[in-house]
Image: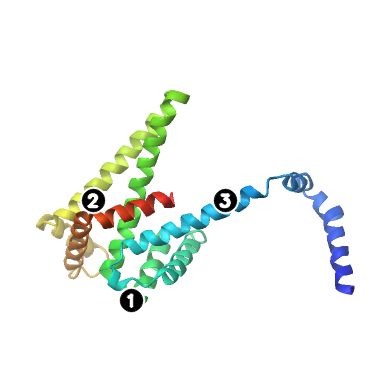
Amino acid sequence: VRRLAELLIVGFVLEYFVVPQIGGTHKAVHVLATANPFLPVVGLALEALSLFAYFELTRSLIPKSEDPGLATVSRIQLSTLALSHCVPGGNAAASTLSYRLLTRAGVGGTDTAFALASQGLGSAVVLNVIFWLALVASLPIYGFRVAYLFVAILGLLLMAFIAGIVILMTKGDERAMRFVHAVGSKLRFLRPEPLPKFFGQLVARFKQLSTDRRQLAKAFFFASANW
């Protein structure tokens, strides 16, 4: 009874003395009280499904023999997503953490790098496809706008850049190998000697993915579901 009385007193003080002192908060609290409680529940469910699709996208790009399982992948990806929102340059730090955690979970270094690279590039491609479909659908309703054209051109440039990377990866010729070696020699924290071999392994994985329609369809489905 004593604790209940203390809670009631604290609630009374917060409601009538603390909250009104914060500009607009008191009114906002009462406005929130009239909001549809069903919508946050739907939003939370959709966010959970989006995260599940993101986890499955990662798993679809990892060889089945090295798949650490949904529980492990979900913990790794939640950790990296949290880190990406907490530190400067979050995406770079998150990619490093994701690579370290996946390799510790038993995924090979090349397969991990391939999965992370394919996940990033594939998500960007899918997002641009969704944007173009939405743009085409909006033209009869809202008409043409210059801002749409500008964003569409940026999307095309991004797609062209990604296509160039994919072509470079799938070709894997001597010029590409020399370029990788030259870049590695300029970076002090990398050893340039093993880079061509590592690059060649990535090329082999890209070629394997490009010929596996079932895996491609699965990755495209989960990338779309995530967005």
Mark 3: amino acid: Gly
What residue is shown at x 23% (from left), y 54% (from top)?
213
Which class describes the residues within 10 Å of circle 3: few (<14), some (14-19), or many (20+)?
few
Residue topped by disc 2: 165
Drawn side of residue 84 relative to residue 62, left or right = right
Which class describes the residues within 10 Å of circle 1: few (<14), some (14-19), or many (20+)?
few
For the question of whether residue 108 can be seen, the reply is: no
Mark 1: amino acid: Gly
Residue topped by disc 3: 43
Residue 94 x, y percent position in the rendering:
42, 63
Secondary structure beneath dot 1 equals loop
Front position in the image: 91 or 75: 75
Q: Quadrant of the N terminus?
A: bottom right
N-term mark: 3 or 1 = 3
Residue lying farthest to the left in this orientation: 174
Residue topped by disc 1: 106
Marks 3/1: CA distance?
A: 34 Å
Judged by depth in the image, the label closer to the viewer, 3 or 1, is 3
What residue is shown at x 82% (from left), y 49% (from top)?
20
Secondary structure beneath dot 3 equals helix
What residue is shown at x 17% (from left), y 62% (from top)?
204
Which numbered circle lies on residue 141?
none
